[in-house]
Image (spheres, rainbow, N blue to C red):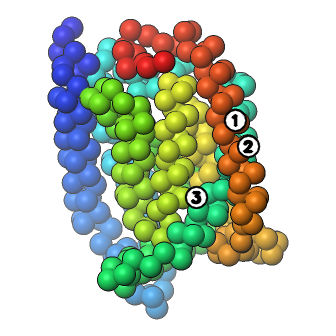
Amino acid sequence: MKTYLKYQPAAVQFLAFLGLAAGFLIIDSVISSFFFTDITKVLLDKNAVISPEVMVKFKWAQLAGSVVSFIIPSLLFAYYSAPNALPYIGIRKTVSPALLMASFLLLVTIQPFIGLLGEWNAKINFGSLQKALLEMEALYNRALQVFLQMNTFGDLLLNLILMALLPAMGEELFFRGSLQKSLLLMSNKPWLAIVVSSAVFALLHGTFFKIIPIFTLGLLLGLVYHLTRNLWYAILIHFLNNAFAVLTVYYANSSETLKKLSNDDLSVPVYVALISLILGIGIVYFIQKKSIEALPAILTDDDNDYIA
């Protein structure tokens, strides 16, 4: 059946994905304007009282954003692209236990390096844009503070779903499985596809004072996906990264270290960050070697973008 996007020029496939992404972003904006307008008012007013009703709306807005903006357009892109839709965007039937463990260790070991990048990023002065960006950052932080209010263990579990699991699934389907893949097909340059998709990933998070560590995490996720052609490893890394942030806030009062982590006040020595980077590079090398062994068993006729 030659109507699938995989049989069309790569540029057509890329434009089709952009069209889907833009269309569902507009739909999400319309939904927000009809159902979640009072959330914006709360965020803009520092003295506003967060009622239980508004808190519930925050949760629904997060759910709607993940599903409508990221998951649905990605799944539609896969459906229209190839007969085996899910494997086409990296959702495979099998995973390697060794690669799962390596993905977990990669996230753990690279944290100090990303933390140091975050410290440097927070000190950047953007000149004439500084005031506007600080206002954006205040709004971003206000949204996080409101959303991360957790009084019970049930609140923690709900936030792990809404802020860790759903974003990990949705954003990896969107940025790596769909955007990075279509960019690779169009450019035939893996590094370009990874860099561009990571830049878009970082920009859409809406914080310029954390953009470098977010971009670096995007590069890491993109590289793991490119090496393994299996989205589950990137989803695991992304989920654990977000879950760690949620858990740090929930347990912040139990330890001074966790409190500093939750407030981004923990300083990372340069030598620790360098060791972190070296260990991370070593684990990426291991992932590359193990992926070469695993790829022949998972690649299908739809994986015509594979570049050794």
Tell me: 70 left or right of 291. left
Task: Give the alpha-carbon distance from disc 2 to disc 1, as whole Å.
Answer: 6 Å
Q: Position of residue 121 (x, y in %)?
A: 52, 69
The nearer-to-camera label among 3 and 2 is 2
Going by the picture, which residue comes out furthest to the bottom? 47
Specify the amino acid type for callout 1: Ile
Element type at mark 3:
helix
Q: Closest to the observer: 283 or 244? A: 283
Tell me: 246 left or right of 198. right
The nearer-to-camera label among 3 and 1 is 1
- Tell me which label, 3 or 2, sits earlier in the chain: 3
Instruction: State whether residue 45 is above or below residue 57.
Output: below
Q: Is residue 95 visible?
A: no
Specify the amino acid type for callout 3: Asn
Specify the amino acid type for callout 2: Leu
> Mark 1 and mark 2 in contact (Cβ < 8 Å)?
yes
Look at mark 1 in the image and give the residue it sits on: 283
Residue at 68% over, 75% down: 265
Q: Position of residue 44 (x, y in %)?
A: 37, 83
Q: Position of residue 169 (x, y in %)?
A: 49, 41
Look at mark 3 in the image and give the residue it sits on: 159
Q: Closest to the observer: 71 or 125? A: 125
Q: Position of residue 254 (x, y in %)?
A: 81, 71
Instruction: State whether residue 214 is above or below residue 264.
Output: above
Look at mark 2 in the image and give the residue it sits on: 279
Q: Closest to the observer: 154 or 290? A: 290
For label 2, count other residues whose C-alpha is less than 10 Å away and answer few (under 14), some (14-19) or many (20+): some
Instruction: State whether residue 21 is above or below residue 288.
Output: below
For label 3, count other residues whose C-alpha is less than 10 Å away and answer few (under 14), some (14-19) or many (20+): many
Element type at mark 2:
helix
